[in-house]
Amino acid sequence: MAEIYQKEIKLSDYRKEDLIKFYREMVKIRKFDEHLIRLMHEGKVSGFYHSGIGSESVSVGSITNILRDEDYIFYNHRGCNQKIAKGVPLSKIYGDFLGTVEGTTRGLGAGIVHSADPSRGVLGQCGTIGSQFNIVVGTAYSAKLRGTDQVSVCYFGDGAASREPLHGSLNWAGLYKLPVVYICENNGYAISSTFEETHSVREHLADWAWGYGIPSCVVDGNDVLLMQEVVKEAVERAKLGEGPTFIEAQTFRHRGHFEGDAYDYVDKAVLNDWKENRDPIKSFKKKLLENQYCTENDLLNVDEEVEYEIHAAIKVAENAPLPEPNRIFEGLYA
Amino acid sequence: MAEIYQKEIKLSDYRKEDLIKFYREMVKIRKFDEHLIRLMHEGKVSGFYHSGIGSESVSVGSITNILRDEDYIFYNHRGCNQKIAKGVPLSKIYGDFLGTVEGTTRGLGAGIVHSADPSRGVLGQCGTIGSQFNIVVGTAYSAKLRGTDQVSVCYFGDGAASREPLHGSLNWAGLYKLPVVYICENNGYAISSTFEETHSVREHLADWAWGYGIPSCVVDGNDVLLMQEVVKEAVERAKLGEGPTFIEAQTFRHRGHFEGDAYDYVDKAVLNDWKENRDPIKSFKKKLLENQYCTENDLLNVDEEVEYEIHAAIKVAENAPLPEPNRIFEGLYA
Amino acid sequence: MGTAVKVKTITMREAIIEALVEEMERDPSTVLFGEDVGKFGGINAITKGLYEKFGGQRVFDTPIAETTIVGAALGMAITGLRPIPELQFGDFVGIAFDEVFNKLGKWRYMHGGQMEVPVTLRLPVGIAGGAGPEHSQSPQALFMHAPGIHIAIPSTPADAKGLLKTAIRDNNAVLFFEHKLLYGMKGDVPEEEYLIPLGKADVKRVGTDVTIIATALQVHTALNAANTLAKDGIEAEVIDPRTLAPLDMDTILASVRKTGRVLIVHEEPKTGGCGAEIAAQIAEKALFDLHAPIKRIGSPDVPIAQSIYLEQFYRPSENQIIEVVKELLEY
Amino acid sequence: MGTAVKVKTITMREAIIEALVEEMERDPSTVLFGEDVGKFGGINAITKGLYEKFGGQRVFDTPIAETTIVGAALGMAITGLRPIPELQFGDFVGIAFDEVFNKLGKWRYMHGGQMEVPVTLRLPVGIAGGAGPEHSQSPQALFMHAPGIHIAIPSTPADAKGLLKTAIRDNNAVLFFEHKLLYGMKGDVPEEEYLIPLGKADVKRVGTDVTIIATALQVHTALNAANTLAKDGIEAEVIDPRTLAPLDMDTILASVRKTGRVLIVHEEPKTGGCGAEIAAQIAEKALFDLHAPIKRIGSPDVPIAQSIYLEQFYRPSENQIIEVVKELLEY
Ligand SMILES: Cc1ncc(C[n+]2csc(CCOP(=O)(O)OP(=O)(O)O)c2C)c(N)n1
Ligand SMILES: Cc1ncc(C[n+]2csc(CCOP(=O)(O)OP(=O)(O)O)c2C)c(N)n1
Ligand SMILES: [Mg+2]
Ligand SMILES: [Mg+2]
């Protein structure tokens, strides 16, 4: 059965600058999200948006300082969290939402999915959630055949995990001992359905992976350092040719499934508890301050710097032109 | 982890007539198969044929005296074993192979798949192996909604088990507590690939089901009585509304994947061991004789009766006419 | 419908809900399922209230597993239920393609005609506001090549209701394509119960100069274009096939023989769209009645961009239709 | 090919193996996989010897998981490999339909043109002796409606080799349809290396009275019919498009303009087959050159029976072609 990942972590095991970096990255992701929602309210961005607020730690914890540009990720449909942590310039992500030529798709537009930045290992994503399961075994097989130590990280929600291709993917990854790290962002809901209403598991979702002989565990995804530890181990295993790992990161979403969702199917008290007591940024900030790794002021400075960075990025994205209509005829074939 | 199903079984726990029935049914299946191969060699039957010789016990053990006409089965592509055990008239199965109007498809023809006999719960089968995984949760949901205690049994090979829909199926069956019995006929090969070459499992294939919280076990499929015991328990559970069971029945195929397969990828010694020492009919016969449940002569009589029955069935099937060419325009729409 | 029929004005969404409720009340073997179709009422609010009315066994939320949803529907159908599954987006039919194309379509036939497959699969389709390449498609034409599959694609609330009721009662598999931009569109719907047969096209506008064959949202674009053309004295006949399989070629051919000019308009990409088969049949059966080449307008043969700005350049427009009609009249 | 070219006579199977070996030797990033394609050499013996030549990492057996096979090919392709997956039967493309239609076809475009998708997916197709409704189909026409997908469908050993080599080198997704009854058919193949471009039809027989457009096995049926017709003084031009996407309409239209009479023959069901799109384009671009209706012959619009006796009534026959050509000449 999948183990519950636990570990005593001392802040002093980390360099101060890295701790601040984790904080900064999480704040960047959250502010990116908040400003995107603002842009939606201002009528500048249309389509679906799935806010990633509440699980910034899953992305920063699994990417920052761990993955290199040459490592591949398949992000999921919730938040741009992973793209940002992987270093895709903010102006380019905003550009995709705004449909300007600054976007990674050079004006075709992209929502959460379909942004890509191959130079940073961000290989795009499917509109059909969970379809990354079978693509990721291809990127991992490719790395192995080419003799590199590139790792492929596959993000997905608990809902996406019910898609059939998970089975084909776990079997291949286990069989060929592929360097894949599966990270399930289990926030307990798939749109309106609770985890219990749509999943049959022995105890945890990660138990599904257990039967394949794949190391699997459940972890508190809202603890950025715990995420760091568990993912570092998985990535190490992948690089050493020891095969895949399956991590179920437990988290919650602060907002509805998409912007506009009434979100009335979630118990207010439960939601509030997550917001108040398990917000990954708040908790981490508290820990930093309590252990006197920095002052309230230091962090305010970070917040302000990030805020500035975001504004600058939005300006770049907004100032870029829309594409010519014939943009739609470009790029179908190589 | 999936348990290894073991049980002390005394022949005396069974009525003599039932023991003879098991023997008769297994012999019927084998002779059906041998005669079909003869018909192929005589050029009367074309297409693929996947002989079921060597695993008659899996079908008889899981169907005879256990399943009723109203219980559903989805047979697999190996042998017509399950159809015969479920009571589909031999002449109709031969008719499908010969393409005469005696066949269940009234002349359209069918190979192993596409025969159907809804009156006996034989609902047909897919040409794409493993696609029965998602159909069977539908028949089981249907039985549940209609308030019947009908059980749905899903047969498949180890190879088919690698198909992606297994995941969707196990999740649904576990979630809705559906009356499904999964019976994996694990003969160690999918065409030329060994089980180990194409499967990643903790220890057994049945471990895949374990993660869903579905009772699962591994059993010697070539012991017809052991099959009876394990399936009876599963069917009982299904009828009581306690949900699905996953049974991995270990067996072997005596012949190549299809008639014409050189079958040179299997170690001769291994094959011989299965044929000599683990043939389900031979072993069962030996047990019956050793325990003096019947005489060699009794069994010879059974063999002869069955042989006669088969010849009669073939005659009926062969004597029926081919359909008119416009048969192909019948039956597309209800 | 005759003038004596009492009507009410409702949206296509309301019309579809009415059809579902009426048929589920009528036949206790109906069962409706899909992602978020239960308590939540469906992401397009098409199943609102059904869970409360019919209970959690007959209206249930499924895991996110489209292959299983469609396969399970087949299993239910051949064992006495009448399933009405929904895919959240019609684009996802690709995930269950084998189940639709080879199983729903062929199960009855390939097993000798012994079983019935009364499945109605609902598929919301169409470009509808920045949803991108995998949430905006109109894949219906693919299934014209699928023996055993019926295809309904309504353009008005009245057609949607009448066709859906027929589809649910039909003992064969029906794919029911609903254009998302039509959900909120209003129209007159008879108060009394009624059914619309599969395979009967509707002449949405009578005309003598040109035949425009259009589906779903494009029926409205074509009607708008026809009204504009009328100001120039050009009378277009607008035909809505309503079902692509069976396809009512009689109505289409009768119109073509009258006008001698044909334009087919659909939202799916031009190449291989429903216009291909319709044009081919016209070229086979009414060639000498034609005064002008057969024209088709579809979306360009490229994936649909996510940008709402670019999106507008896909869907056939009123102007495009007007231009091509005028071109046709020059012959 | 010119007369100076040195040729050898080999089967299409041998021609395909040659193409695979040459391209895998040429480019170490090629990788070939599928069910039983390794040591066993493929159930159609198309990959015999490759495992021994290129090793188990570049030629490998996969689990039975078609969705994963195609999805993995995409992942390999966008990270520097050149995958050549095989599905054991082309019918199984339905299981990986979303992966082909929406992923292979759109990945590059929908991510702004930043990646390449050099996948060649091999798909054995066709009615070939009692294999039944799910192992006998010819699903190629569906993909004419799939932006971003190339479709090759050779009819001779020479075309198969030249097209397959091009497909493998091409940086886009190519579906490569191989009719199983052609595997054993012999033909002349140049000794020297050569490539055949995608999008270039081949006039297999020159004629003046009627244009027959045919694919795969039907090219041979059409050629046989043409030879029979020639005895009656009727000269049919037989065109093999060789690729359905890109589709060489120039060659087709030039022929139509010359003969004024068109028959399209394919093994897939008539409705929605490749003939629909080809006929529609002719009706749009060469209507006034036609002296007769555009005719199509395909298999009937029903699933393929498993009986080898009934099977013969599906595939278009020489007699059917002759009959329709004579009918066309009466106009
Ligand atoms: C194949 C497929 N089915 C359904 C959808 C529609 N959809 C988008 S997100 C979503 C819920 C996903 O839930 P989960 O994976 O748990 O992620 P979360 O939104 O909770 O982060 C659904 C049903 C889709 N995009 N693709
Ligand atoms: C979806 C699909 N893929 C591949 C095939 C071709 N095929 C038929 S049987 C078979 C091997 C099946 O192996 P297994 O399930 O272990 O059954 P066994 O033949 O060993 O009894 C394959 C690959 C098929 N019919 N359907
Ligand atoms: Mg979730
Ligand atoms: Mg096997």
Image (tube, coloured by chain):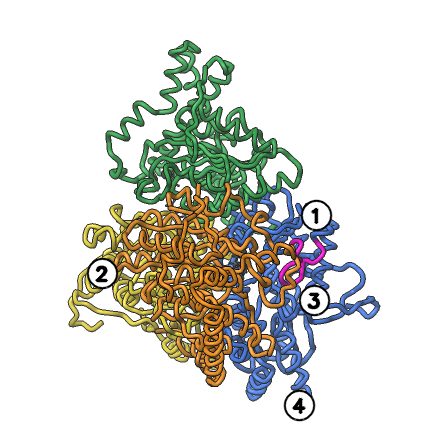
Chain colours: A green, B orange, C yellow, D blue
Circle 2 sits on which residue? C24
Query: How would you rate the neighbour count of disc 4 (Cα within 10 Å): few for under 14, some for 14-19, many for 20 or more?
Result: few
Residues at marks 4 and 3, common chain? yes
Residues at marks 4 and 2, common chain? no
Q: Amino acid at mark 2?
A: Met
Q: Over which residues does the magenta segment extend? A: D38-50
Quarter of the image with the N terminus of chain C in it: bottom left
Circle 3 sits on which residue? D12
Indicate which disc residue D232 carries. 4
Of the two numbered discs 4 and 1 in the rendering, the one whose residue sits closer to the viewer: 1
Residues at marks 3 and 1, common chain? yes
Q: Is residue A144 magenta?
A: no
Give the distance between the C-alpha atoms of the residues marked 3 and 1, in whole angstroms: 24 Å
Give the distance between the C-alpha atoms of the residues marked 4 and 1, in whole angstroms: 56 Å
Q: Does the numbered disc 2 mark a residue whose Cβ is under 8 Å from ligand 1? A: no
Indicate which disc residue D97 carries. none
Task: Determine whether D120 is above or below A282 in the image.
Answer: below
Percent of width and height locating residue D214: 61, 73
Percent of width and height locating residue D250: 63, 67
Give the distance between the C-alpha atoms of the residues marked 4 and 3, in whole angstroms: 32 Å
Residue A16 visible, this orientation: yes
